[in-house]
Amino acid sequence: MADKKILCYIPARGGSKRIPNKNIRNFLGKPLIAYTIEQALKCNFIDRVMVDTDSPQIARIAREFGADAPWLRPKELAQDKSKVIDAILYNLKRFEEEENYQPDYLMILQTTSPLREKKDIEDSWRMMQKTKASTILTVCPTHPRLYYLDKLQNIILANGSEKQSTNIQAWRPGYVLNGCFVYIIKTSALIKEKSVITKNTKALVCDKWRSVDLDEPEDWALAELLYKNKKNLAKRIKQLYGKK
């Protein structure tokens, strides 16, 4: 896959409500968005790093840390219920029309995964190169049993018969998208299917403890604690698994 064009797309809408100004809020010494930008810039196989935002302030800070923010996202694509895929298609079309730039792959990196590592990005790209997937995304392990509550607070098993074994070893392992650590999509498949999860999607499993997605204030506080202690945590987890 030599000479393939890879656009790193970092969505950073300005209207965060649960954590105000989340994308540029100070996270242990610098704006949260800086961690994602810096990781992407260190990957030499990425030829362009773009921040897509409706906020002039976020765009300015993104440029300060080395990202490209060529234009602001239109208001109609930056509402609470706006779909990211619509913003992606808008940007791809505009790049083609204004700069004759057509990336072969789109890599989506969310700002809300500060515990993602450069290795996660590299491993995802390596998996894309070695397989025939049109999408590679990252997941983390979760409990194999998923439940929901009805209006009367009755607990309902969501992913299978309630008569299944109570022995957890009898269940298939469960996985969940881990805050969109990494998405890599063939641009041709994305445009054709109008989805980042395409028909031929494969998953890369990442560490559960690093998969905190900053959605609530509690997530932010937890992520700061984990980030400060990540070296010791990684070492301790290996010890508990019996790995040297």
Image: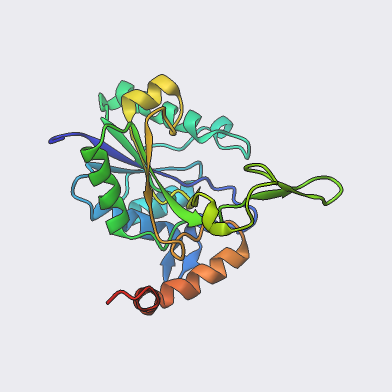
Instruction: Using the rendered image of the protein, determine whether residue 66 is visible from the camera's viewpoint.
Output: no
Give x and y (percent) for residue 123: 27, 51
Compare residues 67 and 174 and report the one nearer the observer: 174
Instruction: Using the rendered image of the protein, determine whether residue 118 is visible from the camera's viewpoint.
Output: yes
Quarter-of-image position of residue 190: top left
Judge from the rendering whether residue 172 lies leftward or rightward of residue 15; answer left or right. left
Judge from the rendering whether residue 107 lies leftward or rightward of residue 79; answer left or right. left
Compare residues 124 and 113 and report the one nearer the observer: 124
Give x and y (percent) for residue 29: 42, 72
Give x and y (percent) for residue 21: 56, 57
Compare residues 147 and 43 and report the one nearer the observer: 147
Callout count: 0
- Vertical side of 226 occupied by 161: above or below: above
Quarter-of-image position of residue 20: bottom right
The residue lying at 46 percent from left, 61 percent from top is 208
Locate the N terminus and report the quarter of the image it occupies. top left
